[in-house]
Image (cartoon, grey):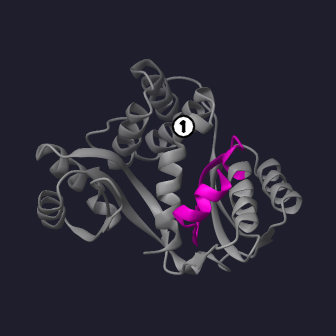
Amino acid sequence: MSGHSKWATIKHKKGAADKARAKVFAKIARQLEVAARDGGGDPNSNATLRTFVLKAKAAQMNNDLIDRAIKRGTGEAGGGTYEAITYEGYAPGGVALLIDVLTDNRNRSGSDIRNIFSKLGGSMAEPGAVGWQFSRKAVVVAKGSEDEVMLVALDAGAEDIADEEDGTWRITAEPSALLPLREALEAAGIDVVSADSTMVSSVSIEVSDVDDAKKVLRIVDALEDNDDVQDVYGNFDISDEIMEAMD
């Protein structure tokens, strides 16, 4: 599995507990707004919007906030004009990072991202320098018995199923299979912990030094803390032993 596989698990464990709830909601609201603007405000006919609505509900965002974000996107309420930008860079140790941004000010966002890399020992990269190794995938984390999860997931289009721990499985598929896969698992009574369209790297860098791991996570945390940054993807793998040593 790619380095992002481990990072996806780390991020799930860290979760929204590391973030102010208001910041998490603000990021999701922006995603809802852009999805509604691009594909309409009906989640039943806009798969991207439906995915973000499910993400919002999983984060315990209330229906009023969700509805208001969608209305801003469809023009029924005042909203901003956001531009999607992807930045590329390197964290310490040559770890590749891909940063998805939604911003109403390209110059501000670019300056913020550049400053984070500069202050924390990373560096910006030219477009395409690291992006070539990432591809978009549907990633679903589910809990259940091996036989049942594999049977349902493979039938619903899963490409790969990896054992995480404690009966938790990480299922990878093409992006178009995200909703069908989630719905099939839920219909079978299998607990879906998370379901996201994410970027997965074909190259993995093992971070085996505690200090290096701290540096990598420090720059990732700083990027994720920026209001304009929606997602940060990396090709690094940090073992459980290194994570425990950091704790």
What span is colored magenta in the figure? 223-247
| 12 versus 128 height, above or below | above
Depth check: 210 or 226 in front? 210
- For this orientation, the residue located farthest to the top is 64
- Residue assigned mark 1: 16
Q: Is residue 17 left or right of residue 146?
A: right
Q: x%, y% of residue 15?
A: 52, 42
Q: Is residue 103 among what the camera can see?
A: no
Q: Residue at x 69, y 50 (%)?
A: 221
| The quarter of the displayed image where residue 1 is located | bottom left
| 22 versus 232 height, above or below | above
Q: Is residue 245 a member of the stretch shown in magenta?
A: yes
Q: x%, y% of residue 135?
A: 47, 73
Q: Residue at x 47, y 38 (%)?
A: 32
Q: Is residue 129 left or right of residue 118?
A: left
Count residues near mark 1 (Cα–Cα under 10 Å), then give few for <14, some for 14-19, many for 20+.
some
Depth check: 115 or 38 in front? 115
Q: Is residue 48 among what the camera can see?
A: yes
Q: Is residue 222 left or right of residue 47?
A: right
Q: Residue at x 48, y 22 (%)?
A: 65
Q: Residue at x 48, y 41 (%)?
A: 37
Q: x%, y% of residue 54?
A: 35, 38
Q: Is residue 147 a member of the stretch shown in magenta?
A: no
